[in-house]
Image: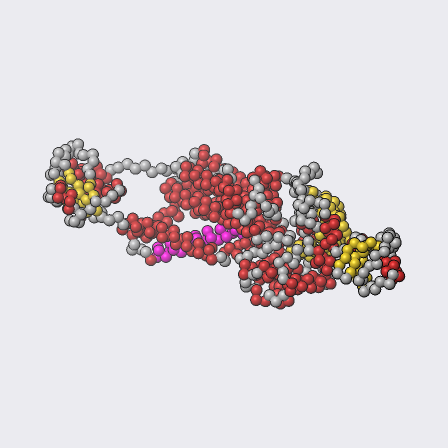
Amino acid sequence: MPLLELQHLRKYFATQKAVDDISFSIDAGQIFGLLGPNGAGKTTLIRMITGIFYPDEGQIIFNGKKFDPQNDIAHIGYMPEERGLYKKMKIGEQTTYLAQLKGLSKADATKKIKEWFIKFDMNTWWNKKVEDLSKGMSQKLQFVTTVLHDPKLIILDEPFSGLDPVNTNLIKDEIYALAKKGATVIFSTHRMEQVEEICDHIVLVNKGTKILDGTVNKIKQDFKENLFSIGVDQIPPSLNGTAPFEVVGNEDLAYVVRITGNNKPNDVLNYLLQRGVNIRSFNEILPSLNDIFIRLVKGTPVSRQFQNVNS
Amino acid sequence: MKKILLIIKREYLTRVKKRTFIISTILFPLLYLGLIFGTSYIAATSGTNLKVAVIDSSGFFDKGKIERENQRDSSSVLTVVDFNADSLKNNFKNWGYDGYIIIPANLDWEKGVRNLSMTTGRTISTDGAAPVQYKLNRIWTSIKNEKLGIDDHKKNIIETSIISIVPKNFNDTKANSDIAGRIGYLAGILIYIILLLYGSQVMMGVMEEKTNRIAEVIISSVKPFQLMLGKIIGIGLVALTQFFLWIAFMTLIYNITKASGGGNQTVSVIVGGVQDTFTSINVPLILFCFIFYLLGGFFFYSSLYAAIGSSVNEDMREAQSLSLPVTMLVIISIAIMSAIMRDPTSPLAVWSSIIPFSSPIIMMARIPFGVPATVPWWQLAASMGALIAGFIFTTWFAGKIYRTGILMYGKKPSWKEMMKWAFRKS
């Protein structure tokens, strides 16, 4: 059963169709990537899911029922891209306060904070202030405040920006652990290599509409261009149209070829073997999400244009 | 509801625990007392006593009369000398005089003389020369009395029988307009200070949340309106706490000075004044109204300040330019207050004490003059009702702007855009 289902969501602002008829669903326990260039409408979408904005049209189904921001936001943890904490407030007090706002009792909050602080090696921070922390440290703290109340749905907007590789891995492992325990994670970013690594399922939005929806593997299959890398010293020159492929590139010690027509990879291998070519390696080249992303959003202006909305 | 309480608690505790709050709470009454005692002390001791030499060419001012006056009143010392004008001019400083006066020979006792110069080596203001003038005039009067044949008995009759007018409202025989005026003024000023001080605290608090970018984190847990309301109520309670602490301090200091300062004349005058004040006014009513108008005015204005704080970015100047119209309203109220103190029942006074933007200050300035004598019950009721309606409207209005503004980054919005945020559908 999907934990979250968006049905034909629409949100127009004065000069922007920020979200224009977007639907998708996210299964419980999934790590879900919400991708899109700057200004695509990701933040507006997330703000509707967190109850900050009401959609103009469409509806959100959360946990099988119509989304009710009043009660359901207690089950959501949101780390916005524009994040922050009270600079002058003591870290322990502040974390307790934020947890209480999510509905935890003071005793529960304190107990959970202590556990997380031990896990993240933040024991000595309790009586410090946020202004004493470095950017990476406050990032970790922000993550803790987001997941402290055991939310069913965790929304992370660019969670790794400003983190060093060690802390990035620490948070990444936590995200996996939380997903394993049943939490659903929405992960919004531009960093495609992280998406490929972490996400099960992605949705790509551009200019307020959904342009891609599927699992990472399926999308890669859908967008593959029948490219293969063949490790050979030399491809025989006498091709004149009989070869089942064309050479599109030449890296050191390997050729990149595209299979033509209805030929299969085996046909390529047969062709080469018949000509006595010594093959060291043969690999399919799947497009990276980065390539797909760029290909799909290419041609749209770099920054979003203002438009008149007559809704 | 529980969340609003949490927000109120945080806003309240973080502010009350701040060092600046503690310092200002203790310092203000001390400064206030220092001002009272300091000014009366300075007034009593400062102002050097002028020593003035007098060359009397007229023969009216004999040494005996001057000596008698010098003994009666030591705020200046006059000495009749026999030197000639030139040597006095060159030497009066060396001889220890601050200046000298030459009384002309042709002085006519019936006509007198308009102006006599007092020559000095430094600039002395008219106020500074007043004791000398007063003393010379007393002597001059006694000279004229002698010439006219007025003896001490007649003189007493002339001097002691004067008529003074004391305004008395037949509706309210206890009212003392002098004390009422002072209390009203103090109450108005206090509300003015609290509105501006704590109103801008609300604005800064909202700006802090916006620039720290914590606003979005918080409003994913609570509604923007709850956050705004919690902040306003929390800071309002801080203002109230500070006010009560001041009252407690003043009462404490008052009781200590009353107990310890029985012998000191200045202290007992002040103590007496305070006692007079409390017996001549309706303390519970004034206190109740004060708290009502303090909070009402605070809600009315601070929600506007919150809306402004939510609309601007880090730039303090943007906040100042946007909040100027609101601040002007508060300042205009104070200007109206000084105008209505002379006649607290004028139409200006009545209307400005009912319209919510000025009523917190103006009504509070009028109430000490007496309810219902000066302020009829219907006016008080209308004013309170209008203020409640007023702050419900401003909070609603500000809530709409706040909801949009708190998540807006980028250029400063104009008032026109903010109106659009307020009145568009949600």
* Residue beneath the point at 56% across and 45% down: B312
Residue B148 lies, in percent from the top left, at: 14, 34
**Residue B236 belongs to the span the image colors magenta:** yes
Q: What segment carries the magenta color?
A: B232-259
Residue toward you, B19 or A173: A173
Image-based side of A270 in relation to B373, left or right: right
Picture layout, residue A200 above or below residue B316: below
Residue A32 falls in image quadrant: bottom right
Furthest-front residue in this view: A238
Say which of B97 and B297 sits in front: B97
- Left or right? Give the position of B66 relative to B127: left
Q: How many marks?
A: 0
**Magenta stretch contains residue A102:** no
Q: Horizontal and vertical percent for residue B272?
A: 34, 50
For the rendered model, the colour scheme is secondary structure
Place of residue A28 in the rendered image (x, y in percent of width and height, measured from the top left): 75, 57
| In-image side of A193 versus B397 (left or right) | right
Observer able to see residue B129 = yes
Which secondary structure class fits the magenta region best? Answer: helix
Mark yes or no: residue B4 visible: no
Q: Quadrant of the C terminus of chain B?
A: top right
Q: Is residue B309 left or right of residue B33?
A: right
Write the residue at 39% across / 42% down. B181
From the viewer's side, name the closer residue of A209 and A239: A239
